[in-house]
Amino acid sequence: MRRVVVTGLGAITPLGVGVRQTWTRLIAGHSGIVSVADLEPQERWQPLPSTIAGTIPGNGNKDEYRWQVLDWLSKGEERRMAKFSQYAIAATEMALQDADWRPATEAQKESTGVCLGSGIGNLEELYDTSIAYEKAGYKKVSPLFVPQLLINLGAGHISIKYGLQGPNHAVTTACTTGAHAIGDASRFIALGDADVMVAGGSESCIHPLALAGFARSRSLATSFNHDPKSASRPFDKAREGFVIAEGAGVIILEELEHAKARGAQIYAEVRGYGCSGDAHHITAPRADGHGAFLAMKRALRNANIPPKNVDYINAHATSTPLGDAAENSAIQHLMLGEDGKESAYQIAVSSTKGAIGHLLGAAGAVEAIFSILATKEDVLPPTLNLESLDTGFRCNYIPGSAQHKIVNVSMSNSFGFGGTNASLVFSKYP
């Protein structure tokens, strides 16, 4: 198998437009979660049980780390693209620039591919077009309606814009999408199908219908509308649900010798990728977290790394009572192994969703970026709002503020509705 490394990063998150801005604010303990109750039309937002979200900072330009679509796309391109595709294009541009990779020759374009997905995609267009069709009929349906709905158009637009002719692959596995995309892309490279892959996830889901749907399934935090920044509380006794958020994360993956030959910077090496299915319930995990345990176990087996060598885990932990407890059970089971030593509980685990909320299909990609930077810079991002640790949680959850620690191996977990699970393992390079 060929070795795979990370050479570029790009992100748009509720903490800002750009990886460095996002990471700096994350490490400083900032939150990107805000109230959406006053968005227009207010009659659609204010009656919702949950009126908080992680939204992308707007009303500015990229030099101010804010979102302005015309910084990244022309008016014609903007009109043709769903917002999740716009975010994906912008994050890709940042990542390619960071990697200093601009495939120009036919051979370079043929060996560079895309693997990017979304969990929900373009809900806003679906909603608006449905209403327009109901009121005025066929002629109110845009010819761009179907292309703007398709999840694979994020990857498609990236491929077209940059002329990338390698594998063109789209993943949509709910909240595991971003992690699966990165893992699948790494295997394309390892197996020789590409030398470079653009990989990640993108989501633009802040819409009253999305909040209504998740609220009806009792998935969202609803008691913190008056205090949005306190709403996402991974591992805390007072946690009650997740905070929906939007954004994109894109990683440039590269075959090691290819990266070395062109003198590319290397953030980390992709060492392992593991997948599993809960085979249990459409939304709830098994209480013992067995599916999560299998994904982590398989990722470490793929990496040929024992659990005791893992220095940091970026947990999926969304701040739901069942989900956090199941993952915690899986982590403790993994780390205790057969010897059952108390030292296993010293593993550092944090959930960055306390700061940015849950980016659904983009979560796994953005959190992989955080795991990569933790490995590169030996800094552990904090779990915000962890004030009273729940019963049975015995690890180091990095409460409140970042910690400094040598991180040689990190793991990033992502789990989704339908019982789909993925874990990624990264290590220092060299």
Image (cartoon, grey):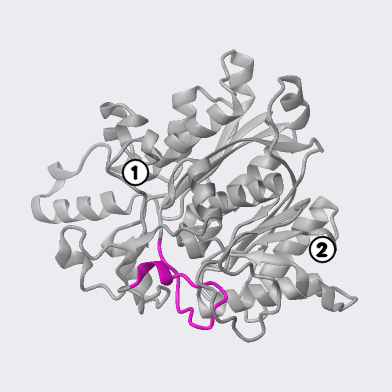
Three-letter amino acid code of the residue under disc 2:
Pro
Residue 49 position (above or below residue 53): below
**Residue 216: where, in percent of width, then height?**
34, 76
Q: In the image, which disc is placed on residue 207?
A: none
- Asked which quadrant contains residue 324, the reply is bottom right
When the figure is inspected, residue 84 is found, relative to residue 102, above or below; the finding is below
Residue at 15%, 59% in the rendered image: 41
The residue carrying pointer 1 sits among few (fewer than 14), some (14 to 19) or many (20 or more) residues within 10 Å by Cα, namely: many
Whether 74 is among the magenta residues is: no
Specify the farthest residue to the right. 339
Quadrant in which residue 154 is drawn: top left
Residue depicted at 53% across the width and 83% down the height: 237
At label 1, which amino acid type do we have? Lys
Task: Decide if residue 99 is on the left or right side of residue 175.
Answer: right
Q: Residue at x 24, y 37 (%)?
A: 143
Image quarter in which the C terminus is found: top right
Residue corresponding to mark 1: 83
Q: Residue 307 bears which disc, if any? A: 2
Residue 392, position in %: x, y? Answer: 67, 84
The magenta segment is 227-244
Seen at 73% across and 25% down, the residue is 258
174 versus 292 height, above or below: above
Between disc 1 and disc 2, whose residue precedes? 1
Q: Is residue 273 left or right of residue 197?
A: right
Horizontal relation, residue 88 to residue 365: left or right: left
